[in-house]
Image (cartoon, rainbow, N blue to C red):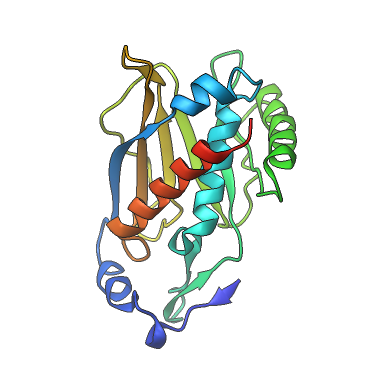
Amino acid sequence: MRTIDLDDWDHAGPFRLYSQYERPQYGLTARLDVTRLMTVLKPAGHRPFIVMLHALCQAANVVAPFRQRFRGGTDGEPLGAVEHEWVGVSPTVARPDGSFGFSAIPPAENYAAFASNAARLIAQAAEGTGLDDPAEGDHWIYLSCTPAVDFTALTNAMEGPRDCVPRIVWGKFVEDGAGRWSCAISIEVHHCFIDGSHIAAFIAETQKVIDTLRA
């Protein structure tokens, strides 16, 4: 983790501006092409949920603003920022009784290692009870999905104006009748760190991972 020098940072202006806002978070909904996921990767035995977790984790680690977080700002300490070396994903996990829990999955050297660890940690969360959060610290992005709903917009609960952990939700995989599959993806972020261009880069990187992952 490195401390960001606000006097030598190209995002210092937006940081100082939006840190004064009551609700500095904003969201954007787009669509991902998941044709290869549904027609190649899934038939080869890959779990779509884990493929999506991997793709989003990879993208968040490539696009640096998704790894940036607040520091300070209390007890007279000036508000500052840091950039984590890596972030993992903390997905919501559905349970058989209709409730849900949370998991925390770090990045891995390759997809096979990530998928194996993710399957184990997801199973643990699915078998658990309560809402204990294993994602200690803020070096995570929060993920969820709505497998039965192809939404057009979505917002998330936020803890307050300093809540800067990105929230990402993807929706139902739908087929267009011509063999192409897609899903909605909602990305909610903090404007002190992330602009629209960063979201565009994140979506492009996510798409790249889905389209290039070996079956």
Quadrant location of residue 195?
bottom left
- Farthest residue to the bottom: give it: 7
Image position of 70 with respect to 176: above or below: below
Going 64% across and 43% down the picture, which residue do you hit?
104
Q: Quadrant of the C terminus?
A: top right
Quadrant location of residue 43?
top right
Q: Quadrant of the N terminus?
A: bottom right
* Residue 101 x/y as whole percent: 59, 30
Image position of 174 with respect to 20: above or below: above
Can residue 185 be seen from the camera position used here? Answer: yes
Going 62% across and 47% down the picture, which residue do you hit?
135
* Residue 186 x/y as whole percent: 35, 38
**In this rendering, would 31 be left or right of 129?**
left
Image position of 15 with respect to 195: above or below: below
Image position of 193 with respect to 146: above or below: below
Can residue 93 be seen from the camera position used here? Answer: no
Q: In the depicted view, which residue is nearer to us: 67 or 96?
A: 67
**In this rendering, would 126 be left or right of 148?**
right
Quadrant location of residue 89?
top right
Going 35% across and 60% down the picture, which residue do you hit?
194
* Residue 87 x/y as whole percent: 58, 55
**In this rendering, would 39 be left or right of 73?**
right
* Residue 120 x/y as whole percent: 75, 31
Going 71% across and 26% down the picture, which residue do you hit?
123
Total marks shown come to 0
